[in-house]
Amino acid sequence: MGSGQMLLALGAMFLLGIIIFSANSNMLENEKVVMDSEFGIAAISLATSLVEEAEGKMFDQASVDSGVTATTQLTTTAYLGKDANESYRTSDSTKTDYDDLDDFNGFFIEYVSDQSHAQIATYRGDSKGFRADYFLKAKVEYVNVTTSTITASANRTWHKRLTINVFSPSSRDTLVFPTVISYWN
Protein backbone atom coordinates (compact mmCIF):
# COMPACT_ATOMS: atom_id res chain seq x y z
CA MET A 1 0.00 0.00 0.00
CA GLY A 2 1.45 3.35 -1.02
CA SER A 3 1.66 6.43 1.14
CA GLY A 4 -1.23 8.02 -0.79
CA GLN A 5 -3.45 5.03 -0.11
CA MET A 6 -2.36 5.05 3.52
CA LEU A 7 -3.36 8.71 3.86
CA LEU A 8 -6.73 7.97 2.24
CA ALA A 9 -7.29 5.04 4.61
CA LEU A 10 -6.37 7.19 7.64
CA GLY A 11 -8.63 9.99 6.41
CA ALA A 12 -11.49 7.52 5.93
CA MET A 13 -10.96 6.11 9.44
CA PHE A 14 -10.91 9.65 10.86
CA LEU A 15 -14.17 10.54 9.09
CA LEU A 16 -15.76 7.27 10.21
CA GLY A 17 -14.75 8.04 13.81
CA ILE A 18 -16.32 11.50 13.61
CA ILE A 19 -19.53 10.08 12.14
CA ILE A 20 -19.76 7.39 14.84
CA PHE A 21 -19.06 9.92 17.61
CA SER A 22 -21.70 12.27 16.21
CA ALA A 23 -24.27 9.46 15.94
CA ASN A 24 -23.59 8.35 19.54
CA SER A 25 -23.91 11.92 20.79
CA ASN A 26 -27.25 12.28 19.01
CA MET A 27 -28.53 8.99 20.42
CA LEU A 28 -27.53 9.99 23.95
CA GLU A 29 -29.21 13.37 23.57
CA ASN A 30 -32.37 11.69 22.23
CA GLU A 31 -32.39 9.29 25.20
CA LYS A 32 -32.10 12.26 27.58
CA VAL A 33 -35.04 13.99 25.88
CA VAL A 34 -37.11 10.79 26.10
CA MET A 35 -36.31 10.38 29.81
CA ASP A 36 -37.13 14.04 30.56
CA SER A 37 -40.41 13.67 28.67
CA GLU A 38 -41.25 10.48 30.54
CA PHE A 39 -40.51 12.18 33.87
CA GLY A 40 -42.64 15.17 32.91
CA ILE A 41 -45.61 13.05 31.88
CA ALA A 42 -45.44 10.87 35.01
CA ALA A 43 -45.00 13.93 37.26
CA ILE A 44 -47.97 15.70 35.68
CA SER A 45 -50.07 12.56 36.04
CA LEU A 46 -49.20 12.08 39.72
CA ALA A 47 -49.70 15.76 40.57
CA THR A 48 -53.00 15.95 38.68
CA SER A 49 -54.30 12.86 40.48
CA LEU A 50 -53.44 14.35 43.86
CA VAL A 51 -54.99 17.73 42.98
CA GLU A 52 -58.19 16.05 41.79
CA GLU A 53 -58.35 13.96 44.95
CA ALA A 54 -57.90 17.06 47.13
CA GLU A 55 -60.49 19.01 45.12
CA GLY A 56 -62.97 16.22 45.83
CA LYS A 57 -62.72 16.90 49.57
CA MET A 58 -64.62 19.58 51.47
CA PHE A 59 -63.04 23.05 51.52
CA ASP A 60 -62.50 23.09 55.30
CA GLN A 61 -63.12 20.98 58.39
CA ALA A 62 -65.82 23.49 59.37
CA SER A 63 -67.68 22.83 56.10
CA VAL A 64 -67.65 19.01 56.39
CA ASP A 65 -70.92 18.79 58.33
CA SER A 66 -72.50 22.18 57.63
CA GLY A 67 -72.13 25.36 55.63
CA VAL A 68 -69.80 28.18 56.57
CA THR A 69 -70.95 31.80 56.45
CA ALA A 70 -67.91 33.67 57.82
CA THR A 71 -64.18 33.23 57.35
CA THR A 72 -63.80 33.24 61.15
CA GLN A 73 -65.42 29.78 61.13
CA LEU A 74 -62.61 28.36 58.97
CA THR A 75 -59.54 26.55 60.30
CA THR A 76 -56.85 28.98 61.43
CA THR A 77 -53.58 29.10 59.50
CA ALA A 78 -51.70 27.49 62.39
CA TYR A 79 -53.92 24.40 62.23
CA LEU A 80 -53.92 23.72 58.50
CA GLY A 81 -53.11 20.01 58.13
CA LYS A 82 -54.59 16.67 59.02
CA ASP A 83 -56.32 16.15 62.32
CA ALA A 84 -54.81 13.75 64.87
CA ASN A 85 -57.33 11.01 64.04
CA GLU A 86 -56.92 11.31 60.24
CA SER A 87 -54.73 9.34 57.89
CA TYR A 88 -54.41 9.21 54.10
CA ARG A 89 -56.49 6.41 52.53
CA THR A 90 -56.54 4.56 55.81
CA SER A 91 -57.79 1.06 56.50
CA ASP A 92 -57.18 1.56 60.24
CA SER A 93 -60.58 1.50 61.97
CA THR A 94 -59.32 3.91 64.64
CA LYS A 95 -58.56 6.58 62.02
CA THR A 96 -60.62 8.45 59.44
CA ASP A 97 -59.61 9.31 55.90
CA TYR A 98 -58.80 12.86 54.84
CA ASP A 99 -62.09 14.75 54.60
CA ASP A 100 -61.09 18.31 53.74
CA LEU A 101 -58.60 20.18 51.58
CA ASP A 102 -56.25 21.41 54.27
CA ASP A 103 -55.58 17.82 55.43
CA PHE A 104 -53.11 17.77 52.53
CA ASN A 105 -50.93 20.50 54.11
CA GLY A 106 -47.55 18.86 54.79
CA PHE A 107 -48.54 15.74 52.83
CA PHE A 108 -45.52 13.77 51.54
CA ILE A 109 -45.79 10.63 49.41
CA GLU A 110 -43.24 8.57 47.51
CA TYR A 111 -43.59 6.29 44.51
CA VAL A 112 -40.48 4.09 44.49
CA SER A 113 -39.71 1.20 42.18
CA ASP A 114 -37.70 -0.72 44.80
CA GLN A 115 -40.05 -1.33 47.72
CA SER A 116 -37.17 -2.73 49.80
CA HIS A 117 -35.63 0.75 50.16
CA ALA A 118 -36.24 2.53 53.44
CA GLN A 119 -39.36 4.68 53.32
CA ILE A 120 -38.54 8.41 53.27
CA ALA A 121 -41.98 9.94 52.89
CA THR A 122 -44.97 9.72 55.22
CA TYR A 123 -46.87 7.60 52.70
CA ARG A 124 -45.88 5.21 49.92
CA GLY A 125 -47.91 4.91 46.72
CA ASP A 126 -48.20 2.24 44.04
CA SER A 127 -45.24 2.65 41.69
CA LYS A 128 -46.20 0.08 39.05
CA GLY A 129 -45.35 1.31 35.58
CA PHE A 130 -42.78 3.91 36.68
CA ARG A 131 -39.12 3.57 35.70
CA ALA A 132 -38.02 6.22 38.21
CA ASP A 133 -38.77 7.16 41.80
CA TYR A 134 -41.07 10.13 42.42
CA PHE A 135 -41.69 12.20 45.54
CA LEU A 136 -44.65 14.57 46.01
CA LYS A 137 -44.94 17.24 48.70
CA ALA A 138 -48.07 19.30 49.24
CA LYS A 139 -48.62 22.66 50.89
CA VAL A 140 -51.97 24.32 51.60
CA GLU A 141 -52.25 28.00 52.46
CA TYR A 142 -54.86 30.74 52.46
CA VAL A 143 -54.47 33.24 49.63
CA ASN A 144 -55.79 36.63 48.63
CA VAL A 145 -57.02 36.65 45.05
CA THR A 146 -57.26 39.79 42.94
CA THR A 147 -57.66 40.18 39.20
CA SER A 148 -53.89 40.23 38.67
CA THR A 149 -52.27 38.50 41.66
CA ILE A 150 -52.55 35.63 44.07
CA THR A 151 -50.65 36.16 47.32
CA ALA A 152 -50.30 34.10 50.49
CA SER A 153 -52.36 35.32 53.42
CA ALA A 154 -51.79 34.96 57.15
CA ASN A 155 -55.55 35.41 57.60
CA ARG A 156 -58.39 33.06 56.74
CA THR A 157 -59.96 33.71 53.32
CA TRP A 158 -62.42 32.00 51.00
CA HIS A 159 -59.49 30.79 48.87
CA LYS A 160 -56.81 28.16 49.52
CA ARG A 161 -53.82 27.39 47.31
CA LEU A 162 -52.71 23.78 47.06
CA THR A 163 -49.15 23.55 45.76
CA ILE A 164 -47.77 20.16 44.74
CA ASN A 165 -43.99 19.79 44.25
CA VAL A 166 -42.87 16.72 42.32
CA PHE A 167 -39.22 15.73 42.29
CA SER A 168 -37.19 12.69 41.33
CA PRO A 169 -33.56 11.66 41.71
CA SER A 170 -33.74 10.84 37.98
CA SER A 171 -34.48 14.43 36.97
CA ARG A 172 -32.75 17.72 37.53
CA ASP A 173 -36.08 19.58 37.66
CA THR A 174 -38.67 19.97 40.40
CA LEU A 175 -42.10 20.51 38.93
CA VAL A 176 -44.49 22.80 40.82
CA PHE A 177 -48.28 22.65 40.39
CA PRO A 178 -50.21 25.40 42.21
CA THR A 179 -54.02 25.29 42.26
CA VAL A 180 -56.41 27.74 43.91
CA ILE A 181 -59.59 26.27 45.34
CA SER A 182 -62.37 28.56 46.54
CA TYR A 183 -65.38 28.20 48.83
CA TRP A 184 -68.61 29.74 47.61
CA ASN A 185 -71.37 30.22 50.15
Image (cartoon, helix red, strand yellow):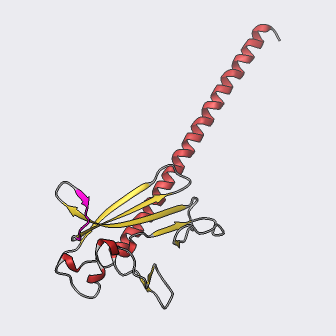
Using the image, determine if residue 173 lies above or below residue 63. Answer: above
Residue 146: percent from the left, percent from the top? 17, 59
Examine the structure image and report whether residue 152 is included in the region drawn in magenta.
yes
User: Picture quarter containing residue 52?
Assistant: bottom left
Numbered range of the magenta stretch: 150-156
Residue 23: percent from the left, percent from the top? 61, 34
Query: Is any atom of residue 56 visible in this view?
Result: no
* Between 132 and 82, the one nearer to me in the picture: 82
Using the image, determine if residue 20 lies above or below residue 172. Answer: above
Residue at (46%, 87%) from the top-left corner?
95
Query: Is any atom of residue 76 visible in this view?
Result: yes
* Between 35 and 162, the one nearer to me in the picture: 162
Residue 125: percent from the left, percent from the top? 53, 71
Residue sitting farthest toward the right = 1
Examine the structure image and report whether residue 99 is included in the region drawn in magenta.
no
Horizontal side of residue 81 vs 22, given as left or right:
left
Horizontal side of residue 24 vs 10, given as left or right:
left
Quadrant, the C terminus = bottom left
